Image: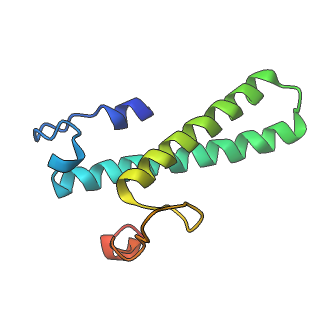
C-alpha cells in the first residue's frame, strides 16, 4: 500500500476521507494503515542504513534512503496532525497525550 492509498482511500461509508465526517471505524482503520506504513518506512530506512555501511557508494541505495526518509517525515507529520503526537519530540500547540486511548486500551499491543 502506498501513502497515496492511505491518503485517497474510499472505504465506502461516505466519509470520503473527510476527517470531520469519518466514523470511528474509518478513523481507526486509517490510523492503523498509517502506523503500518510508518513502521515499514522505519524498517526500510534502518535496513538501507545497514547496507550503506558496507556499500557507501551505492547511488541507488542512497537515493532510496533519502526518498524513504522524506516520505516518512511527510507521513509522520500528516499522522500527527490528524491523530496527535507519535512521540514526545513532536511540537504541538496543545498537550494531547491524555486525549487518546493508550495503545493497550485500543487493543493494539
- Which quarter of the rendering shows the N terminus? top left
Is 107 in front, or is 17? 17
Q: Is residue 31 left or right of residue 26?
A: right
Q: Residue at x 77, y 43 (%)?
A: 49
Q: x and y percent of residue 93 in the render?
A: 45, 63
Q: Is residue 56 left or right of residue 6?
A: right
Residue 74 lies, with reference to residue 95, above or below; the image says above
Q: x and y percent of residue 19 in the render?
A: 24, 47
Q: Residue at x 15, y 47 (%)?
A: 21
Most extreme residue toward the top is 60
Q: Is residue 32 left or right of residue 93?
A: left
Q: Is residue 1 visible?
A: no
Residue 98 lies, with reference to residue 26, above or below; the image says below
Q: x and y percent of residue 87 in the render?
A: 54, 65
The number of numbered discs placed on residues in the rendered structure image is 0
Q: Is residue 4 visible?
A: yes
Residue 21 lies, with reference to residue 58, above or below; the image says below
Most extreme residue toward the left is 14
Q: x and y percent of residue 14 in the render?
A: 10, 38
Is 86 in front, or is 58? 86
| Quarter of the rendering containing residue 61 | top right
Residue 26 lies, with reference to residue 58, above or below; the image says below
Q: Is residue 84 left or right of residue 51?
A: left
Q: Residue at x 33, y 70 (%)?
A: 100
Q: How is the image coloured?
A: rainbow
| Quarter of the rendering containing residue 78 | top left
Is 57 in front, or is 99? 99
Is 95 in front, or is 74? 95
- Which quarter of the rendering shows the C terminus? bottom left
Amino acid at each position: 500500500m502506498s501513502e497515496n492509498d492511505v491518503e485517497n482511500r474510499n472505504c465506502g461509508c461516505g466519509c470520503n476521507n473527510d476527517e470531520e465526517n469519518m466514523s470511528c471505524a474509518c478513523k481507526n482503520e486509517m490510523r492503523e494503515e498509517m502506523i503500518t506504513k510508518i513502521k515499514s518506512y522505519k524498517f526500510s530506512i534502518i535496513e538501507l542504513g545497514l547496507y550503506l555501511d558496507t556499500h557507501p557508494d551505492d547511488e541507488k541505495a542512497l537515493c532510496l534512503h533519502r526518498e524513504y526518509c522524506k516520505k516518512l517525515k511527510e507521513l509522520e507529520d500528516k499522522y500527527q496532525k490528524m491523530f496527535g503526537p507519535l512521540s514526545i519530540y513532536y511540537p504541538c500547540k496543545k498537550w494531547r497525550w491524555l486525549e487518546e486511548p493508550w495503545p493497550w486500551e485500543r487493543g493494539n499491543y
